[in-house]
Amino acid sequence: MISRRRSVGRPSRTSLDALQDAALTLGLDSFTLAAVAKEVGVAEATVYNYVHSRDELYRGACDRLSAGVDLTPDPATDTGSWMDYMDAVSARVVPLAATHPGFTEYLFYGPFGPETRRIYSTMVAEVMRRRPELDANAAYFVASRTFMSSLTTASFPDLQDAGTWLRHSVMLGMEQQIDAGNLPHIDGDWSDVLDHDGKTAR
């Protein structure tokens, strides 16, 4: 009886989770599909069975990071103000951005996956609940500017304290404007940002 020789080579199957893990391990800002394939032990051609491009894998890996962001209020510090809420959520994202260079750019420019949409939608809803005089567009502007100000220094360990100072300063300035009745007016629908093309920060 002639026995079949088992083929020798790299396996032809992996998983999207494994590919995203490899991208995160190698670095969101620097991984290549060839390096990802080597990391998981498959041929580079196999990667294309799961994603169409490096950008698709990059965005998927970033959205996977977003899935781990806790959006619940911090009971130790939350007094019911929108500033307490945004401070807590923003502070949770900064370490992720610091650990994974390239994540900040995704949060600025998108296009966003479902977990990142969850972050922005929840922040807008919470700001509106805590500051009812703000409509959805104004709440998005207030939440997103606070959130983004936290991320501008995330990649620079020596500037972490300065980043917190910047976030607090931005929030205090906006709170003064809101108290004075000087609310931001933004045309259109804020949720369009969730579907924008990723070429410009919003």
Image (spheres, rainbow, N blue to C red):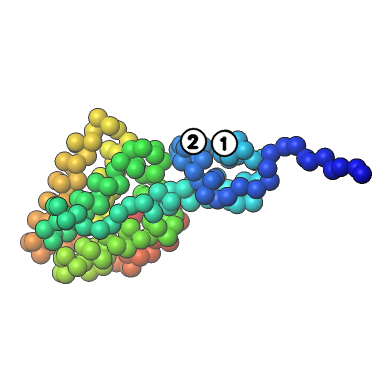
Q: Residue furthest top?
A: 158
Residue 39 - label: 1
Question: Label 2: how many residues lie within 10 Å, few (<14), some (14-19) or many (20+)?
Answer: some
* Horizontal side of residue 108 vs 164, given as left or right: right
Amino acid on which disc 1 is placed: Glu
x and y percent of residue 97 in the render?
34, 42
Mark 1 → mark 2, Cα distance in angstroms: 8 Å
Residue 3 quadrant: top right
Q: Residue sitting at 42 percent across and 56 percent down?
A: 112
Quadrant the C terminus occupies:
bottom left
Which label lies toward us, 1 or 2? 1
Image height of 200 relative to 35, above or below: below
x and y percent of residue 91 in the render?
24, 46
Q: Secondary structure at mark 2?
A: helix
Residue 26 - label: 2
Return the residue nearer the eye: 190 or 117: 117
Q: Earlier in the sequence, mark 1 or mark 2?
A: 2
Q: Secondary structure at mark 1?
A: helix
Amino acid on which disc 2 is placed: Leu
* Horizontal side of residue 20 vs 176, given as left or right: right
Q: Residue sitting at 42 percent across and 60 percent down?
A: 114
Mark 1 and mark 2 residues within 8 Å of each other at the beta carbon: yes
Q: Can residue 177 be seen from the camera position used here?
A: no
Q: Can residue 87 be seen from the camera position used here?
A: yes
* Horizontal side of residue 35 vs 184, given as left or right: right
x and y percent of residue 16 in the render?
55, 50
Q: Residue sitting at 30 percent across and 47 percent down?
A: 93
Q: Residue sitting at 9 percent across and 56 percent down?
A: 176
Q: Residue furthest front?
A: 1
Residue 101 - label: none
Residue 95 quadrant: top left
